Structure formats: structure tokens, C-alpha cells
Image: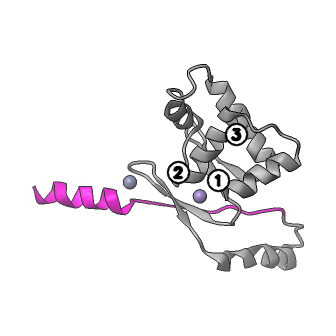
Amino acid sequence: MLTDSIAKLKNEKIRITPQRLAVLEYLVESDTHPTADEIYQALVDRFPNMSAATVYNNLHLFMKVGFVKELTYGDASSRFDFTNTQHYHAICEECGDVVDLYYPVLDDVEMVAQSLIGFEVTHHRMEVYGICPNCQEKRNTQQAQ
Ligand code: ZN
Ligand code: MN
């Protein structure tokens, strides 16, 4: 995954700076859908001269190249997802965790929309909301006390 992305950047003639590589590595390794600020906080010790804007610029560059997606759920800060596979997200209403949900069956919805209402479909999005297993357990232990 990391080497694929580096190849794509090179293809686009984009320089692989140490900071750029660090942001990319952080995204590849984290499965938590970090915010730009979380990435910045995680890397600033290694790169004291790096600004939050650098992280942002790199994220937007990765989005343009196509292997990073921005997730906006109406809250203050958007999260970033390193992905090349269509998937959905389940969002915990208590802790805000964003969990991957793979459900390829839903790919059909684009074809269905096309044939039912004649849309030339570009994409679709769906989210599931609820309480994650961790928060359920917290609730249960609180109730037991
Ligand atoms: Zn939760
Ligand atoms: Mn995801």
C-alpha cells in the first residue's frame, strides 16, 4: 500500500519529502481515520519545523492523486482515510470513533439508480450511526456498579 502510493506520487512528479513521507506513513499505519490535527500532533516531535498547514497541504495533495479521502460528518474537523477500496463508515455517537464497514452489495445501488431514475451516477455515500462495542461495554459496567 505504501509503496503503491509512493509510486503514484512519483508518477505525478511529486517530490517525496521526509515530511510528506511521514504523513503518508502515518495514514497507512493508522486505521482510526485521523484528523489533520491528530496527524500534526503525532509528527511534530519528529519535525519541529513542520506546520499544521504542511499536513493539510499534503493531505490535499494525496486526495488529488486519489488514495486519500476526506470524511466530513458535519462536525468541526474532517477526518482522513487512506483507502482504495469502496467502504462505508459506522460512527459512534458517544466517542466519535469511525469504523470501516465493507458491504459490496451496495455497489448495485448506483446501477439501480441509473436504471430507475436515469441518473448518471458519480458516487454515493452512506453512514451508520450508533454506539460502538467499547462504549456499549462502558455503559454496561457503569450500570453494574
Ligand atoms: Zn464509542
Ligand atoms: Mn475508512
Residue drawn 60% across the image and 41% down it: 78
Residue at the spot of label 3 = 59
Q: Quadrant of the C terminus?
A: bottom left
Q: Is residue 84 above or below residue 23?
A: below
Residue at the spot of label 1 = 82
Residues in magenta, as a range: 122-145
Observer able to see residue 128: yes
Which corner quadrant of the image does residue 117 belong to? bottom right
User: Most extreme residue toward the top, as rendered?
Assistant: 49
Residue at the spot of label 2 = 30
* Residue type highlighted by circle 1: Phe
Residue drawn 67% across the image and 34% down it: 18
Whole-percent x, y for residue 83 in the image: 67, 58
Q: Is residue 114 above or below residue 86?
A: below
Mark 3 lies on a secondary structure that is helix
| Dot 3 alpha-carbon crowd within 10 angstroms: few under 14, some 14 to 19, many 20 or more | many
Which corner quadrant of the image does residue 37 belong to? top right
Q: CA distance from mark 1 to mark 2?
A: 9 Å
Whole-percent x, y for residue 141 in the image: 18, 58
1 and 3 marks in contact (CB < 8 Å): no
| Left or right of 2 on screen, residue 13 | right
Q: CA distance from mark 3 to mark 2?
A: 14 Å
Q: How is the image coloured?
A: one colour
* Residue type highlighted by circle 2: Ser
Depth order, front residue of 119/29: 29
Whether the residue carrying mark 2 lies under 8 Å from ligand 2 is answered with no
Whole-percent x, y for residue 45 in the image: 50, 27
* Residue type highlighted by circle 3: Leu
Q: Is residue 48 above or below residue 135?
A: above
Whether the residue carrying mark 3 lies under 8 Å from ligand 2 is answered with no
